[in-house]
Image (cartoon, grey):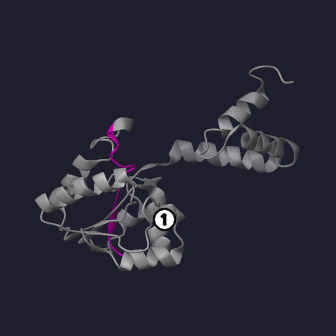
Amino acid sequence: MSAPDSLLDQLVEALQCLPGVGVKTAQRMAFNLLERNRPRGRVLASALKEALDKIRHCDHCRNFTENELCSICADTSRSSNQLCIVEGPADVRLLEANTDYQGRYFVLMGRLSPLDGIGPEEIGLSQLETRLQSEPVEELILAIGTTVESDVTAHVLSELAQRNHAKVTRLARGVPVGGELEYLDPGTLMTAFEGRTQY
């Protein structure tokens, strides 16, 4: 048996920070890297270090980027009349890959959940309100999940948009109750996006 706090134990523990990775899965990953994939493990370690050191949040929409502005915010050909609100950066990638949306985004980096200490400031509502007041946003598209927390978040966002004279729509059919955008297939996502209705 390995000594407490050995390098192997530290690696197994570190791998458990990934979602859905428990002790057994972390052990399999660690043994695979050490037994068969040391060169790939070094590439992984290098890519992880570089990403953690250099990737930041876009100053405008809070998406992930290496620059002050992400490529979408920097693209002057995109419309400022539509602002799509998503819960995380993975949702932006999903919508970009599977819809023909040409507006802009705002990434909440979560959803309102007072029990977890996530309030309006944590999801950037003051920054969003500043954008609504300074940009010609006509439609706020709520491309968020359908959990209880997402519904509360949608209600607050709807009130914020109405105060700033923007129409509010929300993804319609295709998104199951309790579902998350990142787990939808492309066809379901496209149908839901095209069939959004006023909220």
Asked whether residue 99 is in view, the answer is no
Residue 47, position in %: x, y? 64, 49
> Badge 1: how crowded within 10 Å, few (<14), some, or many (20+)?
few
Q: Examine the rendered structure and indicate whether residue 150 appears above or below residue 53.
A: below
Question: Which of the pair 168/102 is nearer the observer?
Answer: 168
Instruction: Say above or below: 46 vs 79.
Output: above
Q: Quadrant of the C terminus?
A: bottom left
Q: Nearer the viewer, residue 151 or 88?
A: 151
Determine the image quadrant of residue 119.
top left
Report the quarter where the N terminus lies: top right
Q: Is residue 44 left or right of residue 173?
A: right
Q: Amino acid at mark 1?
A: Arg
Left or right of 81 in this view: 142: right
Find disc 1 in the rendering and name its residue.
Answer: 93
Q: Position of residue 18 (x, y in %)?
A: 61, 44
Q: How many discs mark residues in the rendered view?
A: 1
Q: Main secondary structure of the magenta part?
A: loop
Tell me where residue 74 appears, x and y as whole percent: 36, 64
Residue found farthest to the top = 4
Res 15 seen here? yes
Q: In this image, 19 relative to 69: left or right?
A: right
First to last magenta residue range = 101-114
Q: Quadrant of residue 75?
A: bottom left
Relative to the observer, which residue lies in front, 60 or 164? Answer: 164
Q: Secondary structure at mark 1?
A: helix
Q: Up-down: is 139 above or below 4?
A: below
Q: Is residue 102 magenta?
A: yes
Q: Does the magenta run of residues contain 159?
A: no
> Residue at 37% across / 79% down in the picture?
194
The x, y position of residue 186, in whole percent, is 52, 75
